[in-house]
């Protein structure tokens, strides 16, 4: 009978040494999202929790089969990425799914500082961290933010969008084309400039109220973009008019969905509906890549539903280990 995987705690100083095998584990987890990838989380750790992010690992035959990076904030032990990440989770190789309770029970061992509770946020319905809590732990289940997900059906993936929205999208594409505008994906060489335009356009649209106005978020995106490109996880959709980007949409490409993370457009061109143009193109691109869902992530903005998105429940667990 095979022995149980070996459990270990990785201190903050060792987290970055896991990058290659972390990426390999992520690719073996079919329900993982880019928010659990090292391309997203290692830059996050550099900027949001420098020297404060440890991890629990599981190894079988010297192969990494389980990983849960954590950090502490205001008395809570949280999953790495909490805050900017719309989906949180640990990684557990499907061949070792039965090890989920051990992984959960070991999370306190990786805490880099004292804490009084575990706060596990934005867990999907199939998360290994929804396994039964260890005996003696207390638990609360606060409400979590649902994510809105659209199934991609039909040739262009837009069959679930309303007929009016599909017509609006095609009309907007024609109008942009008549003006000499173009759309497409930013090339790897264009990514740094496109990220700067994304930040600029988001600021034009939302001002200081925009999520991307946060200097930490800006630093994270600038740092993460090259790693996401190398990992094949970044899609930057852009609309260009008169040689200038008038809209950019950042999409993270995962194994089961493409996730529309954030975007921006120049309000001076709002009549062209550049954001709608890019959303439709992003859904079509995801379909062409063989993905069956487009994840609009957190937030209940009405525009998501006209594209056919429906709420997917997420879960939050607040656990207090026994003394």
Image (spheres, rainbow, N blue to C red):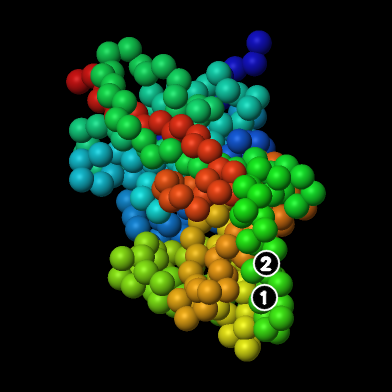
- Vertical placement of 87 versus 108: above or below? below
Alpha-carbon neighbours of circle 1 within 10 Å: few (<14), some, or many (≥20)? Answer: some
Write down the residue under mark 1: 175
Alpha-carbon neighbours of circle 2 within 10 Å: few (<14), some, or many (≥20)? Answer: some
Residue 150 position by quadrant: top right
Which residue is drawn at the image coordinates 66% and 55% (left, top)?
Answer: 166
Which residue is drawn at the image coordinates 36% and 50% (left, top)?
Answer: 83
Residue situated in front as seen by the camera: 175 or 63: 175
- Vertical placement of 49 versus 22: above or below? below
Image quadrant where one finds the C terminus: top left
Provide residue 289's location: percent of width, then percent of height: 75, 51
Q: CA distance from mark 1 to mark 2?
A: 6 Å
Which residue is drawn at the image coordinates 36% and 16% (left, top)?
Answer: 134
**Which mark, residue 310?**
none
Which residue is drawn at the image coordinates 43% and 38% (left, top)?
Answer: 146
Task: Check contact, mark 1 vs mark 2: CB within 8 A.
Answer: yes
Q: Residue furthest right?
A: 155
> Is residue 109 shown to the viewer in this render?
no
Q: Residue furthest bottom?
A: 242
Write down the residue under mark 2: 171
């Amino acid at each position: 009978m095979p022995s149980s995987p070996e459990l270990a705690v990785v201190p903050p100083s060792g987290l970055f040494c896991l990058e290659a095998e972390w990426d390999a584990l992520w690719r073996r987890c079919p329900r993982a999202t880019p928010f659990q990838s090292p391309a997203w989380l290692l830059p996050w750790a550099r900027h949001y929790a420098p020297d404060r992010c440890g991890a629990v690992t599981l190894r079988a035959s010297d192969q990494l089969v389980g990983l849960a990076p954590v950090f502490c904030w205001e008395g809570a032990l949280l999953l790495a990425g909490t805050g900017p990440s719309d989906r949180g989770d640990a990684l557990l190789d499907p061949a070792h799914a039965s090890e989920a309770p051990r992984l959960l029970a070991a999370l306190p061992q990786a805490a880099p500082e004292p804490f009084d509770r575990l706060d596990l946020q934005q867990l999907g319905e199939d998360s290994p961290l929804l396994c039964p809590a260890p005996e003696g732990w207390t638990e609360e289940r606060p409400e979590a933010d649902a994510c809105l997900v659209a199934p991609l059906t039909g040739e262009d993936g837009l069959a679930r969008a309303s007929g009016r929205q599909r017509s609006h999208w095609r009309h907007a594409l024609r109008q942009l084309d008549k003006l000499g505008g173009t759309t497409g994906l930013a090339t790897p060489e264009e990514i740094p400039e496109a990220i700067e335009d994304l930040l600029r356009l988001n600021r034009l649209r939302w001002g200081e109220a925009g999520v991307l106005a946060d200097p930490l978020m800006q630093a994270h995106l600038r740092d993460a973009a090259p790693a996401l490109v190398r990992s094949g996880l970044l899609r930057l959709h852009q609309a260009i008019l008169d040689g200038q980007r008038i809209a950019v949409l950042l999409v993270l490409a995962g194994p089961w969905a493409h996730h529309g993370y954030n975007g921006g457009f120049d309000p001076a061109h709002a009549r062209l509906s550049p954001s709608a143009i890019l959303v439709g193109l992003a859904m079509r691109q995801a379909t062409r890549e063989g993905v069956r869902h487009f994840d609009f992530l957190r937030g209940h903005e009405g525009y998501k539903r006209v594209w056919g998105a429906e709420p997917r429940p997420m879960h939050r667990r607040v656990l207090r280990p026994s003394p």
